[in-house]
Amino acid sequence: MSKVLVVADNAKVTAELVAAAGSAVVVESKSARAVAEYAKNNSFDAVFVAATMDGKEFAARIAIALDSGIITDAIAVDSNFVTTQSNFGGSYTVKAKVNRGIPVITLRPNSVEPASQIPETIKLEGDDNSLVTIKSVKPKVKGARPELAEAKIVVSGGRGIDGDWSAVEKFADSLGAAIGASRAAVDAGWCSHDLQVGQTGKSVSPDLYVACGISGAIQHKAGMQTSKNIVVINKDPEAPLFEIADFGIVGDLASVLSKASELINARK
Ligand SMILES: Cc1cc2nc3c(=O)[nH]c(=O)nc-3n(C[C@H](O)[C@H](O)[C@H](O)COP(=O)(O)OP(=O)(O)OC[C@H]3O[C@@H](n4cnc5c(N)ncnc54)[C@H](O)[C@@H]3O)c2cc1C
């Protein structure tokens, strides 16, 4: 059986990496070099890391320390470490395998069902010497909504919201969802870039993605089409996003969302 080393992230994402690995040893460390040494000294067959911003940066440094190949943004990994990626706006499904060293693979959050248990985490000491010293880090103040990249449900607004988030927010809160946005909404200054979904924003794979007033440009699809269920609300029946919708509603988003929020809240 293969030996997989999982780099710990938050509990849910770590449980997903453990599930993808089958069985795994979980380590926590600030040092990519320490992780690489541990993987080499203990003859691991692969290293799995979360495909988050920080995870991918850390994974790249582990791969350099191991002198190994790396695959990022996998949505599945088989027992021979052949990965599946959804590339170029989802128009290509790519199967790839690292052919040098101990493969380092980053897996997108929400791609697999989390394991029910996480093995005890081993702490690896060390801090990589860096040419850059970080003087201070100020975490962004988080709201009550879940983190976009990890949320089970995402409700996104596009140009169709016309700058008014109230219906989207009310609906998202009725479902405990994260809020996302198209680039048109971000470029219009209606929200910050960290809510953007798509090629130049975040990639998400929630159980449910609700797109409100978003036409379905390839660059938007690139960040959301691996969602398990896609609901599209658009007043234009010809909007391209309907092509990948599991459920589509043609109508004005404000009225559809306010009716839906009412019904959901009534059923709680
Ligand atoms: C290099 C590059 C990178 C890009 N990266 C991204 C990216 O990461 N993410 C991204 O999203 N885009 C990205 N884009 C932009 C992308 O091409 C589109 O321009 C953008 O996604 C359009 O956003 P939208 O669907 O909100 O707006 P539009 O295309 O203008 O669509 C608005 C939709 O709202 C509907 N609508 C209007 N009013 C209502 C209403 N009251 N009720 C219901 N529906 C309504 C309309 O029918 C329409 O379908 C990128 C583009 C380039 C060139």
Image (cartoon, grey):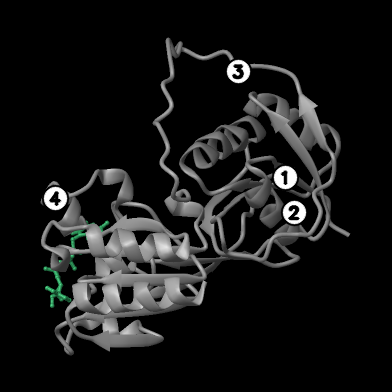
Asked if disc 1 and disc 2 are in contact, CB closer than 8 Å, the reply is: yes
Residue at (13, 56) in percent of width and height: 163
Q: Secondary structure at mark 1?
A: strand
Mark 4 or mark 1: name the one nearer the start of the chain.
1
Asked which quadrant contains residue 41, the reply is top right
Near-viewer residue (129 or 192): 192
How far apart are the alpha carbons under marks 4 and 1? 37 Å
How far apart are the alpha carbons under marks 3 and 1? 19 Å
- Answer with the quadrant where ligand 1 appears in the image: bottom left
On the question of residue 154 being in view, the answer is yes
Badge 2 amino acid: Val
Q: Which residue position holds label 3?
A: 128
Q: Is residue 73 above or below residue 121?
A: below
Q: Which residue position holds label 4?
A: 187
Q: Secondary structure at mark 4?
A: helix
How far apart are the alpha carbons under marks 4 and 2? 38 Å
Q: Which residue position holds label 1?
A: 6
The N terminus sits in image quarter:
bottom right
Mark 1 or mark 2: name the one nearer the start of the chain.
1
Q: Which residue position holds label 2?
A: 18
